[in-house]
Image (spheres, rainbow, N blue to C red):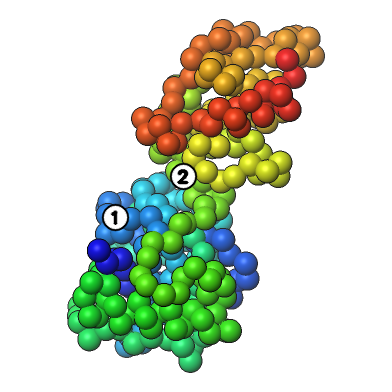
Amino acid sequence: MGVRLVVAVTDGDWFDHLRQKVGLAEVNFWAPSAANFKALEPGELFLFKLHAPRNFIVGGGVFAYANALPCSLAWEAFGDANGAASFAQMRKRIAKYRKAAPDDRSDFLVGCRILTQPFFFAEEHWIPVPESWAQNIVSFKGYSTDDPDGLRLWEAVQSAVAAPTTGGFGEQQARYGEPMLVRPRLGQGAFRILVTDSYRRRCAISGEKTLPALDAAHIQPFADGGVHEASNGILLRRDIHSLFDAGYVTISPDLRFEVSRRIREEFENGRHYYELHGQTITVPEDPRRAPDRTALSWHNENLFRG
């Protein structure tokens, strides 16, 4: 069975901003509407095409995840990896595409296509679009390596990413040879969005569902060897996240919320947190995204203040 690829029409300012950055782990290819994106599965290629008349494929990335977010939270998760220098600039572009009124202050819901291992071709390696590309396409077109156009496109991308002037994806040697899925390496932004959706946008402890008040917490911090994987994350209300990172609360390997006596001793407070002590947390429906018991043990043994 072949591998799918998507060629998407790219905002030129988005592309110009990102191709000048070095060491990008991930980018957010946002769409001004919140329509579902189901054209790819994680590990397939998402490619960028400039607006006509520059009908060239100029880069791409490994598709990791898609969902819809308020634009403010997309900015908070990815910053200038949204392809803009500031949130105001990003929002202005979204408003332009949505043809929003000048006085519209909405926190627009945007479609997020999260890509890891992004790559940007030097101009001499830009790839002409396949013959089957129609000039009236305004969003994207899918291809498969089972078809001649898709296979030629795959081979052209492999050749371009092998060029010394291409950064990012071309450095990963597993890309060459037969068409195959690439395991996406999640960055901080993708981790946050995946964990948020895994917990159905509710705090695992309190049930709070006000999205701006929620954080994706690492169980074992990245700086201490933890990974950006859903199983090393848990969605928490921001105050609980702060206490979790500081070791004043933890989650036991049997998935119970525990509160340190140190909150009462040091702050003469904490009644709300003690009311939650001992309760079983909510976990994702997908068992592969459930909290890793080894990571929970690490937090209990290395961070929790007891």
Q: How many residues crowd around disc 1 within 10 Å: few (fewer than 14), some, or many (20 or more)?
A: some
Residue at the extreme front? 178
Residue depicted at x 79% and y 14%:
266
Among the 4 quarters of the image, the one containing residue 218: top right
- Which residue bears the numbered disc 2? 193
Q: Is residue 282 above or below residue 224?
A: above
Among the 4 quarters of the image, the one containing residue 157: bottom left
Name the amino acid type tagged 1.
Phe
Using residue 209 as the reference point, say whether residue 226 is left or right of it: right
| Residue 154 visible | yes
Q: How many residues crowd around disc 2 within 10 Å: few (fewer than 14), some, or many (20 or more)?
A: many
- Which residue bears the numbered disc 1? 37
Quadrant showing the N terminus = bottom left
Residue depicted at x 43% and y 61%:
182
* Foreground pick, 109 / 101: 109
Residue depicted at x 31% and y 62%:
99
Where residue 162 appears, as percent x and y from the top left, is: 51, 81
Where residue 236 appears, as percent x and y from the top left, is: 53, 29
Quadrant showing the C terminus = top right
Using residue 265 as the reference point, say whether residue 257 is left or right of it: left
Where residue 34 appears, as percent x and y from the top left, is: 31, 51
Where residue 174 appears, as percent x and y from the top left, is: 49, 68
